[in-house]
Amino acid sequence: MKIIAVTACPTGIAHTYMAAATLSSVGREMGHDVKVETQGAMGIENELRPAEISAADLVIFAADIAIENEARFNGKRVLHVPIREVLKDARKVLTRI
Amino acid sequence: MALALSFRCPLAGGLHARPASRLLALCASLDADIEWRNLRTGRAADIRSPLALLSTDTLFDDPCEIVVGGADAVAARDRISRFLASEAVGATSDPDPRRPAGPQPSPGLPPMVEDAGLWGLCGRPAAAGLAYGRLRSLPPAFSSAEPPAGVVPVDSGPAGQAPDFDRVVAEARRRLDADDDGATGVARDILGVRRDLLSDDGLLTALRRALTEDGGAAGAIGHVFETYRRDLAGMRNELVRDREHDLRDLHRLLLDVVCPRRGGGGAGGHRGRPVIFAADVTPGEVLVLARTGIAALLLGRAGATSHSVVLARALGIPVITGCDCAALAARDGLPVVVDADQGVVIDATHGAARRYRFLEGAVRSEQRLAAPFAASDGPVMFPAVAANLVLPSLPEDERAALAETSAAFRNGAGAIGLVRTESMLLAAGSLPDEDRQTALYTGVVAAAAGRPVTFRTFDIGGDKIPASLPRAPEANPVLGLRGVAFYRRHEQILRTQLRALLRAGEAGPIAIMIPMVRDPSDMVWVRRVLEEERKTLAERGIAAPGPCPLGMMLEVPSAVLMAAHFCPVADFFSIGTNDLAQYLLAIDRGHPLLAADLKGPHPALLRLLDQAVREIRRQGRPVSMCGDLASDSAVLPLMAGLGLDAISVDPAALADIRAQLASLDRDRCRGLLEKALSCPDAGAVRALLATVPVRRRRPVVATDCVSLDCDWRTRAEVIKGMAGRLWLAGRVGGRHDLEALLWRRERHYSTGLGFGIAVPHARSPLVLHSTISIARLRRPVDWGAIDGAPVDIVIMLTAGMTAPEDDHLKLFSRLARNLVDAGFRGRLRACRDRQTILELIGQALAGPEPQGVS
């Protein structure tokens, strides 16, 4: 599966990146193709391109705050999860899909 | 013939008790009749009656008039106008002793107290300190000026005899003097106000009438004071309204004299040192409480500038104001912890409160041992920091000056960079003789215990003129006979002082500095006089001490511009920014509207200083700064950029200035100065100061960021402890505010990420140097982690907000990514000492992203 995700947390210096690292590595272990955009204190990094968005089978918002440029994902299937769920058990989050 | 002087009141706090006292002292020796009229309130007063002066309710900028008549009218008018100029807003360089010490109040109870669910109460911090004791209300006999029950009033005695008025007043004065004995500095000033009030003609007349004519002395005294107090209560000037306390003190004192109390009026019955609470206290009560020994003072109404609070602060008593006294009264007798830095009172019956006191005490004592700047891991401090000192205006205040000298060294001063000597000359009216001066100077040199002391010879002339000296009137005294020009016409004053200084030099190393030098020939002349006086001493059989460095103030623009020419004749230089800026920018430093502009800093001043400092250093002479700019932390990076050898600052600013200097980067400060030199005006320089980074770069993780074997027992204790350590390392500005921020994040949801690891974090301008702190706990604590497991490894990420600190965010994100990797966590847990932890973190920050997770 092609999975894309956006992570964001209020302070943007720890959980955004911990969630991104977790989603990528667990996703890959489960055989998915994963790309994660981070929206932290350094701004948007590893930004998802329009082609990647349109090709994705699933979008995950692992966020505790509003996502920037959310309109990019209009019409996509989006799974909203709190960051702590990802950190607690990413495998469980990814098997829900 | 009557003379009038019209002006707008230039006194920052209006005409309150202290300026009123000074006016009284100033005019005491004159015969003139002097009246102060406030045109706004329409009230007028004799200038020798402090109470009447207060009742003119004069605020800053009120239109006023002084009308002078009688023999000394001209002298009186001149004296008053000079006084007003010297006291004007911005003219005094004294630090404001009424400024509350310590941080601003933090909203709410400390997280550790809230977390433990303890009862606590918040007020406004007024005098810093940490204390413990049982809550006690002020005894009723204390809080009321009425005679306590059981006292037999004198007037009900045999034959209804009235007490002898003069005896009553004399006894009251004697008791006030006894109170004042041993008081120094601000405390002395404040207590002196009561003595002045008791000399007030209006008050004395009313009291005399009351005591001799009315039926009952106690009631009559009460009536007089009630009238005055009602009058003051209606004043708009807050500082004047505060004097109601001093009247209450006097009232009780007179009652005590007239109707002696049985059993005395001390804070009797207190066992241990209690925490006293009261709606309000008078300075006299503070004094009695301090003698009986109290742990802290909690007040309901008093403001941070009231005399009672200032006095308590001077006596080292922690004070919190704005307390809910009803809530305290409901808990009378409860043991409490008082953190007056934070303005909180905490129920101490719970173990968490005792832990709070223990942890707070630990941070404070560690800070005293090694102030934040000492923990820096960079090059030694530049420039060196010395303290400014003002010799007391009255010989009796000598002890205060000596205490201040010792305090300056305790706060980290390397030397006394400037001793102002002229105040004694201006107050005494006549020149203290050589022996008297020698004793005073020797006291300071001895207190400095071998560290160098630089004395500046009398800086007189301009607005500072000794009353005893005949002087031709000058239309523009600031541009008239000052410094050396003055000495050349009053040589004996200089000669006497130089002899006294040379003699004091036997007690330790001293340097002599000459003010207002205009030409190199001035220094040649002073040096010749110095050598002549050394010979005079030798002829008198007084061993002339070794060579004594003779330096000069750089404060006349032409001399600063010509600095190179002074290097052959001056051993050292010290920049006096106050006069230099006034002369350079054509702004009167006493002007109520313009003086603030002198704080600039104007690029012209910076250019002049930069050129002079380069020139002087090229010739190998030391150059320092002792003016107000050196004590102004806002412009400190610019002063550091000048490359001075030392700065000498107000003792009150010493600790802050040292801490800030320790965080500055020399090259960055120089870069900032270069930019400032090409700015068009002061506003542009200020804009640069706000944006250009000047702090030293410090590694994001270092040995002082790793704590092993920490004995913290709850999440709240860990966060408090780690914030405290970061502050001790000089990496964050406010530890309590940081603690609150970290908690705000924890309340969102726990940062315990499982596997016994927590990652508390915050991003704030409070953070001076972005830091990764690591703490390993002796006992795991509950962190509300996602897997419910207790935490024993805490990795705290604190990020700053300035542009250069942003670079560290990348490192933080890399570490965060590593922390979700099971392999990394395993290696971290296996580390046994600081060094291996640092190495592991270093690898994680430098290496590639981890691959495996959980």
Image (tube, coloured by chain):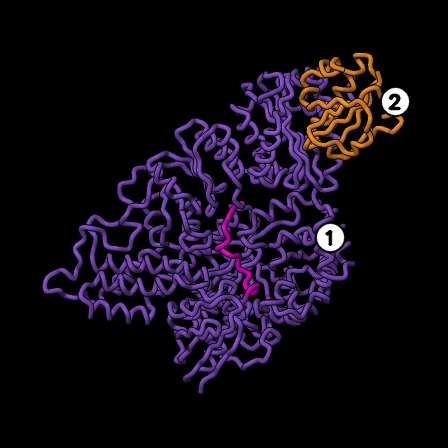
Chain colours: A orange, B purple
Position in image of residue B245 (x %, y %)? 36, 57
| Disc 2 chain ID | A
> Is residue B99 part of the magenta span, yes or no?
yes
Residues at circles 2 and 1 in contact by the CB criterion of under 8 Å: no
> Of all residues shown, which one is farthest toward the front?
A75
> Is residue B823 part of the magenta span, yes or no?
no
| Disc 1 chain ID | B
Quadrant of image for the N terminus of chain B? bottom left
Residue located 37% across and 50% down the image? B280
State the predominant SS element of the stretch in magenta. Answer: loop
- B82 relative to B681 in the view: left or right: left
**What crowding class fits label 2: few (fewer than 14 Cα within 10 Å), some (14-19), or many (20 or more)?**
few
Say which residue label 1 marks: B688
Which span is picked out in magenta? B89-103
Give the SS element for disc 1. Answer: helix
Say which residue label 2 marks: A55
Q: Which mark is residue B846?
A: none
**What crowding class fits label 1: few (fewer than 14 Cα within 10 Å), some (14-19), or many (20 or more)?**
some
> Does residue B114 sit above or below B509 in this rendering?
above
Residue B702: tell me if it is visible: no
Q: Please name the amino acid that badge 2 sits on.
A: Ala
Q: Nearer the viewer, mark 2 or mark 1?
A: 2
Position in image of residue B428 (x %, y %)? 43, 69
Residue located 58% across and 47% down the image? B656
